[in-house]
Image (cartoon, coloured by chain):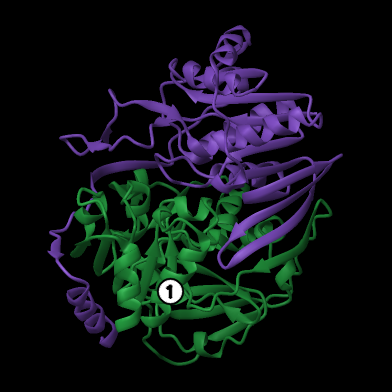
Amino acid sequence: MKILVIASAKNGQINANLANVLTAASKIHAKCDVLVIGSADLTSLSKLACVNKLLHLSSIADEQNLASFIASIVANIAKNYTHVLTAADSYGKDLLPRVAGILDLSQVSEVVAIVSPNIFKKPMYAGNVLAEVESFEDTKLLTVRATSFTPYTALAEEAAVEVLSNSAEINPNISHLGETVIHSETIDLSHAQIIVTGGHSLGSKENFVELIHGLAVKLDGAVGASRAAVEAGYASNDCQVGQTGKVVAPKLYLAIGISGAVQHIAGMKDSQQVIAINIDPNAQIFEYADYGLVGDLFEIVPELINQL
Amino acid sequence: MKVLVCAKRVVDPNVKVRVKADHSNVDIEHSKMSLNPFDENAIEAAVRLKEQGLVSEVLVVSIGGAKCEETLRTALARGCDRAILLETLENYEPINIAKILQAIVIKEQPQLVLLGKQAIDDDANQVAQMLAGKLNFPQATFVSDLSLSGTTLTVSREMDGGTQQLELTLPAVVSADLSLNEPRFIKLPQLMQAKKKPIEKITLSELGLTLTPRTRIISVIDGEVKKHCTLVKTSAELINLLNKAKGQ
């Protein structure tokens, strides 16, 4: 078996969920090669025990690191492996299926467990169903749900780095105009230990900022939002937790004014502890919560902010 | 200029699916079915381009059983001009759907392929990217904003930590996020008009394709994790719980 893990670098930083993908890879085979796309310092990565060899596409600039430019290079490398894994984040979800299309291979998305080298578990129907899927491909392409695997940490001798000289295949039919990065005063949702999430019932952006951001800051947590809250403009799209947003699994998930639609539950049900505040005692969110308080969030949350 | 969109018939997003007793798959035979919500966004975007006079025809494709005709009628009522139904009893996986669409794109020559970013049944999020890779068209996935000027398409796409702006020269493949637009409500006259619009039925062999399964579902289990919720009475009790969690 030959395993390839794809990592991406941006602003000189390798994607933080790579360590989780390496754990998934190590459940298939003890060693893997890691392809890093973009410029970054690979020293700490090279010391991980599961890393056999590092392949570094170091000359790809951030604005060239687009699926349309690099998928054919990745496809040429990927076809020599039995398994190719990458994180099911916005980068991996964009890139790997294009590679699959080029190589005419199927892909298993959002893998949450490795059953055997051929069999994987993945959620369907917004996580209401967990399927065991067998792949018949010679090269199995997998995107991995990072929150389902712990970060890989075991160390060993430094692995060799092979610098690949390929430059991006610049397709004149696409160009990168720019990026708008959302700066938040709170920490990143994907890696947060505590997440405070607000729903549509916050009523306005001002309330959302005052109450949800306010409480998140007090708890050293990150801010999440339901799709309805994002659509109402209370929070940025980046904060959305759910089937079509981010999947999170923090130690504590605080759901405030969240009704608990299945699409939202899909994004947070693996949280270790869930606390819900809702005015409706029949709100579905209470079925997925460890603790609940039935009451008016506009009275309760300010009390929490004042007393924490 | 022609735009190609798709209409996948899926279980209605408000239906709670159940696993079959033998765990072979989900039991959806009697469930309410709908047009995949992300496909609604893609169709809406295509129809708006037509209403702006930038596109001459919106062609909608569905792949599946005879009942997909209902799904296509919905898409036609939403403003698509013409439909193709690839009739099959097979439930093709994304790579095979991409191959079917590739054959249709080669035949129909649309300049823009606008697809939903994922279907809410298998949640795969693959077809648009696979199709773009096969056709060697530039791709823009998870698009939340788009504007067309001649053959230049400018998009904003959702990514972790923000948005990315890209400029693409057609032909191109785009996948729609829910934030792209608010799909319109269909009114009765539009439903009546849709009945008069043509639906062409084609088969796999007419496209010259033979497809083989690459994966199989061995079993499915209920993925739900309901908990026993302890209700607390006061904010003070919650503060205790939160202080405990914060201290860990």
| Residue B231: quadrant of the picture | bottom left
Residue A175 % position (x, y): 79, 58
Q: Can residue A152 be seen in this view?
A: yes
Q: Is residue A170 left or right of residue A81?
A: right
Q: Residues within 10 Å of mark 1 (few under 14, many from 20)?
A: many
Tell which of A74 and B113 is nearer to you: B113
Helix, strand or loop at mark 1 = strand
The kind of residue on which mark 1 rests is Ala
| Image location (x, y in percent) of residue B101 | 61, 32
Left or right, B200 with respect to A81, comes to right
Label 1: chain letter? A
Q: Which residue is drawn at 28% across and 37% down?
A: B17
- Locate the N terminus of chain A by quadrant: bottom left
Residue beneath the point at 12% across and 64% down: B230
> What hue represents chain A?
green
Residue A104 spot, x, y in % from top left: 57, 45
Chain B: drawing colour: purple
For disc 1, the marked residue is: A222
What quarter of the picture does the C terminus of chain A occupy?
A: bottom left
Name the foreground residue: A31 vs A238.
A238
